[in-house]
């Protein structure tokens, strides 16, 4: 039985690149470069790399990147786009990575893997595997859904306001206060024009939970900000208006 996120990302590489939330790559990579002091000797892992947009941009800028994803169609699209670039794209489940102390930086952007799993334990496994893959010292930069947002706003209205013609749509959202999961029906048209209706659920996290999870995994310094699409900044204090949060953690 496939999980909703496995079905969603099947044959969705080209369409995925047209979604609104994938349009901030350049600005996001500018931020990543600044965070690592433009040090080209560092090795980066892009977890849940999707169609490889951050991996490709960072490689063009001279960094060595390995991109991993669970979806073969997303990875296929990434390889097509990467053409003459030397990028190592590999298929892995982020809950079970084969790496140990190999990377200076891990990035996990645009809900690449982290908050999509069926249980909190599985989401934790992802963070645990990231921590294991990183060198000491190492840095993790990721975005995740801000649990403060649905307490004040309708997720359904927000998604509708940021969706354009032909993009995935979300309806019948119900936010569960006991689990901080948003359940919805996502409708998406794949690259072959097939309509899919999927029952999805995503976990929203509050900053204190993220801080605690990362501390248990040996991260010493954890900073959390509001995540503005394509314009990440340490000047953006996290508020209830931010749909996503930007997390920067250092081992």
Image: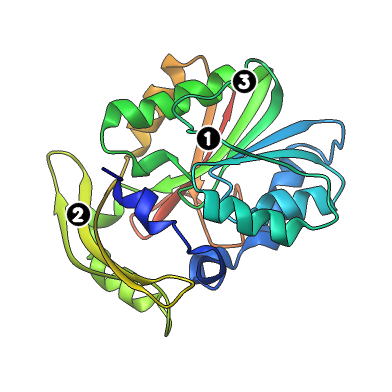
Q: Looking at the image, is mark 3 or mark 2 nearer the viewer?
A: 3
Q: Check the picture and name the quadrant holding the N terminus.
A: top left
User: Where in the figure is residue 41, as x and y percent of width and height?
Assistant: 87, 31
For marks 1 and 2, the one nearer the N-term is 2
Across and down, in percent, residue 238 comes to 44, 49
Q: CA distance from mark 3 to mark 2?
A: 33 Å
Furthest-bottom residue in view?
165
Task: Answer whether residue 242 is visible to the viewer in this image.
Answer: no
Residues 159 and 6: in front is 6
* Inter-mark Cα distance, 1 to 2: 28 Å
Give the residue pinned by disc 1: 223
Residue 220, compared with residue 114, is above or below; it is above
- Looking at the rendered structure, which numbered label has been put on residue 99? 3
The quadrant of the image that shows the C terminus is top right
Task: Say which element carries label 3.
Answer: loop
Query: In what element is the residue under mark 1?
Result: strand
How far apart in space, not on screen, are marks 1 and 3 (Cα)? Answer: 25 Å
Which residue shows up at 36% across the image and 32% down it? 123
Identify the residue position indicated by label 2 in the image.
183
| SS class, disc 2 | strand
For marks 1 and 3 on the same chain, the one whose residue lies earlier in the sequence: 3
Question: On the picture, is 157 further left or further right than 116?
Answer: left
Residue at 21%, 60% in the rendered image: 184
Image height of 127 relative to 10, above or below: above
């Amino acid at each position: 039985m496939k999980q909703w996120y496995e079905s969603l990302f099947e044959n969705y590489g080209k369409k995925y690149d047209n979604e609104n939330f994938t349009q901030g790559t350049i600005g996001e990579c500018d931020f990543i470069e600044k965070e690592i002091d433009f040090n080209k000797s560092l090795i980066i892992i892009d977890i849940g790399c999707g169609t490889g947009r951050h991996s490709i941009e960072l490689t063009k800028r001279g960094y060595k990147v390995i991109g991993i994803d669970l979806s073969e169609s997303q990875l296929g699209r990434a390889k097509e786009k990467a053409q003459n670039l030397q990028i190592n794209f590999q298929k892995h489940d982020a809950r079970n990575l084969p790496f140990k102390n190999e990377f200076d930086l891990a990035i996990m952007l645009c809900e690449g893997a982290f908050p999509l799993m069926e249980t909190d334990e599985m989401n934790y496994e992802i963070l645990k595997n990231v921590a294991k893959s990183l060198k000491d010292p190492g840095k993790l930069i990721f975005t995740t859904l801000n649990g403060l947002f649905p307490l004040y706003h309708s997720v359904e209205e927000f998604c509708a306001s940021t969706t354009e013609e032909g993009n995935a749509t979300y309806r019948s959202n119900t936010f569960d206060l006991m689990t901080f999961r948003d359940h919805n029906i996502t409708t998406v048209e794949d690259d072959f024009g097939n309509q899919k209706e999927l029952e999805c659920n995503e976990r929203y996290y509050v900053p204190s939970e993220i801080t605690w999870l990362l501390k248990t995994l040996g991260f010493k310094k954890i900073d959390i900000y509001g995540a503005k699409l394509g314009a990440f900044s340490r000047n953006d204090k996290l508020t209830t208006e931010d749909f996503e949060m930007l997390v920067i953690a250092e081992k």
